[in-house]
Image (cartoon, grey):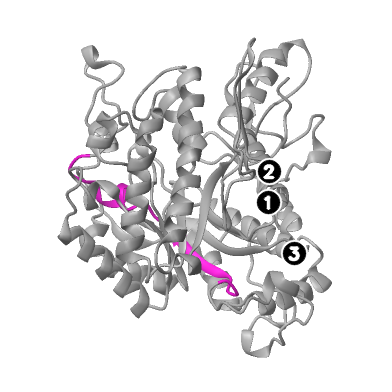
Amino acid sequence: MAKGVREVSESEIPLLSSSHVVASTDGGATHNSTDPVMNKFQKGVAISVWQNSGDGDSNWARYAKSRWPFRSFGISAIRGMHNIDTNSDFWNRYKEDIGLAKQLGCTSFRFSIEWARVEPKRGCIDPSAVQRYHDILDCLAENGMEPNATLHHFVHPGWFEELGAFTKDANIPIFVGWAAKAFELWGDRIKLWATFNEPTCYMFLGWIVGIAPPAHFVDLIGAGKMLQIMLKCHTAAYHAMRKLPGGEKAQIGLVSHHITFLARGNGILYGAAKSMANWLTYWWGWDVVDHWMLTGEFKWKLPLVGDWIVEQDPAGKPPCDWWGINYYSRCVLHWSLQPTNFGKEVMTDMYYPVYPDGLYHAIKRSSAYGIPMYITETGIADALDDRRAVMIDAYFKAVLRAIGDGYDVRGFYYWTLLDNFEWATGYAMKFGLYAWEPDGSIDRTFKEGSRPLVRFYKTLPDTMPELKAVVDKAREQLGSDLWARRELEEEGLLPVTEEDVDQPVGVFAIG
């Protein structure tokens, strides 16, 4: 374990066992739900079934086997020697993987329902795929885990891609039909549903930088239209699912990527970096979706042009029962537009540093929606496994800090269970709590850096009132941030907050 991440003793937090906690009497409607699922703090892992199993024919299966954009040079769209055809095979080894999640102390399991497997041809439902998801749900129930299902995690059938997917309003009923069919098949077994995973990330990677299907490059007009249609699909799917038998009991949410960008400095030299940071935060970050959630108005802006799309939903704010926060970090741009960091911040294997304060700020900003929040993804790409423990400890404490401050966070899902196929980066990015290699050299080996998550999951209570009581008691003894900053400093990783930089971290204005 990293030197700055130490075990918390019983003397420091005497109420770590839920059997010793008296439920809070001042939790109000936020924590005193009569619904046992909504009254729990879900502790889980998040996976994409496709990233661990692949499929026969989907938009991503096609893209992964393509050689865009340098076909004539024979350069693959995917980094590395191995493609999605070589995978950890969750589809057939789900019992083993769910068992591994159980060993971590998980009480919930977030996963994708793969449309391309269930409906490989339009109108043709594969009964074997339907049964396999029932088998997965049976296994989750046997292991005491609450399922959290996502209907679209970047992947859809190849036939839907051929129809134009989310680029045409005429295709909205097709996605709504898929959502309704999924609810008809498994609605009595799943309470927590998400219509989409990270609409802005899907848009940015596929329409602006071109490293995901449909591999458009700087198609800013197409990007805005696609995002608008995808958000319309959420609203329409929500209403359709609600109208079905049992729909009134479902909790239907939306999962969004929360990332901001800022320049490393000020002055003329950083002018381009600041402009780029503003636009990246607006497009890839969550400014567009945030405005839509608060007002029901979809607004898409373009450089030099200004407002390009402005449409107000007559019904007002979109329907949403819970909000999924996918947070990893914020990105700092050098004047050369290359990723960098501040001071002693430690970089991950991706293009950003470990930055726990950003998770707290994402929770704070998202609380404006007035609905329960879940940390549906957070994790670290760390091939050496020498930063994972620090990251887990600091990020989890940021969530506990938010709960202590009264924000309605009801779960934490680490991304991800096993090292998996991370889209265009292939198997280069190691996010897993368990190591897995496509060459067969390592198969589901526990990583030492994962231990802090096991400690949190197995020690902290499961219900919201009990957890709030534990957090309040701990903050009395350790301070509001639960010693997170002190431990980072001991590790030699001085955290950077908004007070440490000369420009705001979070919301950027695009005039």
Question: Residue 21's quadrant in the figure?
Answer: bottom right
Q: Is residue 239 visible?
A: yes
Within the magenta stretch, is there residue 49? Answer: yes
Q: Secondary structure at mark 2?
A: helix
- Residue 141 coordinates in the image, percent (x, y): 36, 77
Q: Which residue is mark 1?
A: 369
Q: Which residue is mark 3?
A: 482
- In the displayed structure, 253 sits above or below 421; it is below
Q: Which mark is residue 56?
A: none
- Residue drawn at (37%, 71%) of the image: 189
- Of marks 2 and 1, which one's residue comes earlier in the chain? 2
Q: Secondary structure at mark 1?
A: helix
- Of marks 3 and 1, which one's residue comes earlier in the chain? 1
- Of marks 3 and 2, which one's residue comes earlier in the chain? 2
Cα distance between the residues tagged 3 and 2: 32 Å
Amino acid type at circle 1 is Tyr
- In the displayed structure, 198 sits above or below 332; it is below
- Residue drawn at (49%, 62%) of the image: 450
Within the magenta stretch, is there residue 439? Answer: no
- Front residue of this view, candidates 179 and 363: 179
Cα distance between the residues tagged 2 and 1: 6 Å
- In the displayed structure, 259 sits above or below 262; it is below
Q: Which mark is residue 294?
A: 2
Amino acid type at circle 2 is Leu
